[in-house]
Amino acid sequence: MKNSDNLSIYSIRKKILLMSKVIGAILVISYILSTKLPFSSDISLSIWTVFVVLLIFGVDFLMSCFISKPIAKLEKAAKRMADLDFSSSCDIMTNDEFGRLSTSLNVMADNLQNALMRLEAANKQLEKDVEKERLLLSERKELVDSLSHEMKTPLGIIRAYAEGYQDEDDELKKQKYAEIIISETERMNHLITALLDLSALETGAVQLTSERFDFVELLETVAGRLLINTPDANFELQYELPDYKIYVCTDKIRMEQVLNNLIINAKKNVKPDGILKLCLSDENGLLHFSVYNQGETIPNEKLKKIWTKFYRDNRLRYSGSGLGLAIVAQILSMQELSYGVKNLADGVQFYFSIPTVK
């Protein structure tokens, strides 16, 4: 294969050898012809000299086409590659060593460009992984700090009443102390469960599973369980719900959790004998849900903070884990659903929207 390449008529060496032979033959023939012209020897020599000069220019032009220009193009392409510029290829189309070298350079440039693209992608992924790890470490620290802070109150209460239980002889008081200890223990258990659930959602350890279901039926089920015929229902329940089925496609269990947390939040914040209102409307392919509780409004500067972990308003009449609304925000954000909260004239309204399906 190597010998056939050396003997190929398209090789640079073969072209130069062929050109030198042709030029030699032309010089000999032109000299012989010039001596045969019907002119004096001086004129004939001058004509031959002019012809030789023209021949030299012709040879120079051919050498430029065959060697100088391809070398310049190769040099330019190599310089671009050295500067990591792969925007244009080397366009030597000849079927010789320069053409094959040009093809090899273009292939190498493509390989280098692909390698650089893969390297850049790997660097970006590494940066994302490092940032993700940094955020994870930050969230772990925040989680530990928040959990430590939230545990202090119930643990302090449990310890105080446990000591009182040991020193108390009155059975009624001991029973009361035991009930308080059990209540605070349940509160701690609820806090830890909610916190683990939220952390699983935030880290992606839990994935949402979509299914098609009737949203109206789900809302009626949740609202019926939480609001109807309950002993602590010191409010007026109002609702505006469609009298037909409206289907959505999402994680039914998590959506039930969203409705549960929002309704419980409204129930805890509605003022005595105030209005708690549920609304559901279907418009332009979107299902709009809202829950309103009559009572104290939220200061405007705190409207965004209520979605954060462990946020609680000191003015509220109840104590909770401070995680219910954070879980709602995380579940809705994972589905890229719009949600929010706003103050009305004499209360607060929470809302979100979800696409409907046939």
Image (cartoon, helix red, strand yellow):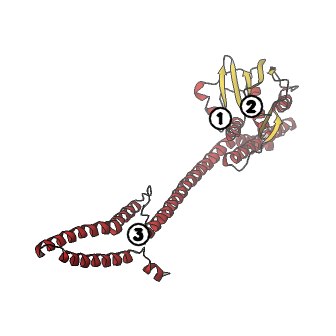
SS at mark 3 in the image: helix
Say which label, 1 or 2, has the lower sequence index: 2
Q: Amino acid at mark 3?
A: Phe
Cα gap from disc 1 to disc 2, whole angstroms: 12 Å
SS at mark 2 in the image: helix
| Residue that label 2 marks | 262
Is residue 181 at least partly visible in the picture? no
Mark linked to residue 98: 3
- For the C terminus, give its image quadrant: top right
Image location (x, y in percent) of residue 7: 43, 80
Residue at 62% across / 28% down in the picture? Answer: 303
Image location (x, y in percent) of residue 58: 27, 67
Mark 2, other Cα within 10 Å: few <14 / some 14–19 / many ≥20: many
Q: Amino acid at mark 1?
A: Trp
Is residue 117 at least partly visible in the picture? yes
Mark linked to residue 307: 1
Image location (x, y in percent) of residue 61: 29, 66
Q: Is residue 201 left or right of residue 78?
A: right
Tell which tag, 1 or 3, sits nearer the viewer.
Answer: 3
Mark 1, other Cα within 10 Å: few <14 / some 14–19 / many ≥20: many
